[in-house]
Amino acid sequence: MKIVRNRLLPFRGFDAINLFGVLLCHRETVLTPELIRHERIHTAQMLEMLIVGFYLWYLAEWLVRLVVGRNGWKYAYRHISFEREAYENMHDAGYLSRRRHYTWFRYLRSFD
């Protein structure tokens, strides 16, 4: 994974953003193994959704959770199925080696 440190992205409040398999982070961001693993999980999700599908689904799911959940944008973000999978498994060093395709689909549950 290519890492690009910059001043613009990600937006305030976020450590990193994965755009098309390139990790963008601020110059002062500490890249822990867990953070890198989180973003690598997103890369796996992107590849199985043919990249464009990932971003379309991500945006659509965020918008639905934002409108229906009525708990704010941060809540909607943390409950996107892609994010649920990545956050739940970012501490497991062997996760990506045994991860099955479309595992994120199991995280599409109601607004709990």
Image (cartoon, rainbow, N blue to C red):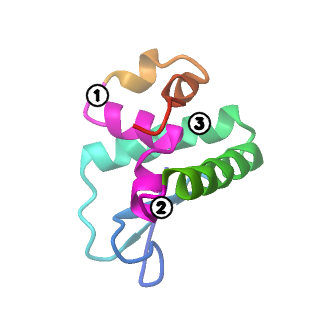
**Magenta span: helix, strand or loop, mainly?**
helix
- 20 vs 9: above or below: above
Confirm or deny contact between disc 2 and disc 3 (CB under 8 A).
Answer: no
What mark, if any, has residue 45 been given in the picture? Answer: 3
Amino acid type at mark 3: Gln
Q: Residue 23's x, y, as percent?
A: 48, 59
Q: Write the residue at 58% across / 26% down.
A: 105
Q: Write the residue at 46% across / 41% down.
A: 40
Q: Residue 44's x, y, as percent?
A: 56, 35
Which region shows up in magenta?
70-93
Residue located beneath label 2 in the image = 17
What mark, if any, has residue 93 been given in the picture? Answer: 1
Is 107 in front, or is 96? 107
Q: Which sits earlier in the primary sequence, circle 1 or circle 2?
A: 2
Q: Residue 34's x, y, as percent?
A: 27, 43
Is 71 in front, or is 18? 71
Residue 3 seen in the current view: no
| Residue 75 belongs to magenta span | yes
